[in-house]
Amino acid sequence: MQLCGNQLATRVAVAEVLAPDPPRSRQRPHTPFHRPRMVTSVNSLQKEAKEYEFSVEHPLQHEAEAAAVEAAAPYLKKRDELVLEVHKLQQQADSDQTTARMLRGAAKGTANGAVARQAGGDVVGARDAMMTAHHQMYQAIYYSDKARKEITKAQGVELMIPAYADAVQTIEARIRSRVAPSLYPPEPVSAAGFTAPLPPV
């Protein structure tokens, strides 16, 4: 299993969705239009056959791999949740920064309008426009501050991801060696003589 390590990447699970078969031509039932689906089906069957053959010929290794994947699943799930949370926080921060920029621009335009009203003798209109400009600027400050907090939170969550990526590797290696010690070496012990605790799930 390849892991992202310290590189933040969103895991994309590719699932093939069975779609309704396209209408078949009576004259040419095996045109190239149908071949990709036929090839995919054949490849899928071949893959299943190879996996079954492997499980029969190497039952202990197959059992160890299955147990390792099952044991590491909660940590893999938590890692993926953290990756998704970072992605959402970054998207929200980008949106809030855009809102802040728009509000600052609007506040500047409104303030310029207030100055023009003042110069034209419209004191009341200038006062109202300036109040609106101040309100827009306060909103811009709010969204800018909100974006900074979201970025800080995303950075904190991102720092947690490598621990769960490492936990997946640790758990898988540990379970493999327990289920099939003749095939997999035992978990290495650190120089300090103890193994670091796993992160919570």
Image (cartoon, rainbow, N blue to C red):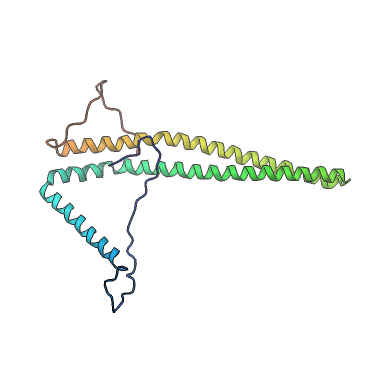
- Residues 130 and 23: in front is 23
Q: Is residue 125 left or right of residue 46?
A: right
Position of residue 112 relative to residue 43, above or below, is: above
Where residue 91 sits in the image (x, y, percent)?
51, 45
- Residues 32 and 113: in front is 32
Number of numbered discs visible in the structure rendering: 0
Position of residue 26 relative to residue 75, above or below, is: below
Q: Quadrant of residue 20?
A: bottom left
Q: Is residue 24 left or right of residue 102?
A: left
Q: Quadrant of the C terminus?
A: top left
Where residue 19 sits in the image (x, y, percent)?
34, 66
- Please give the name of the residue rendered at 63% of the width and 43% of the height, measured from the top-left corner: 101
- Please give the name of the residue rendered at 61% of the width and 41% of the height, measured from the top-left corner: 143
Where residue 93 sits in the image (x, y, percent)?
54, 42
- Please give the name of the residue rendered at 24% of the width and 38% of the height, measured from the top-left corner: 172
Q: Residue furthest right?
A: 121
Q: Quadrant of the N terminus?
A: top left
- Please give the name of the residue rendered at 63% of the width and 40% of the height, measured from the top-left corner: 142
Q: Is residue 113 left or right of residue 82?
A: right
Q: Quadrant of residue 189?
A: top left
Q: Quadrant of residue 198?
A: top left
Where residue 79 sits in the image (x, y, percent)?
36, 41
Q: Residue furthest bottom?
A: 26
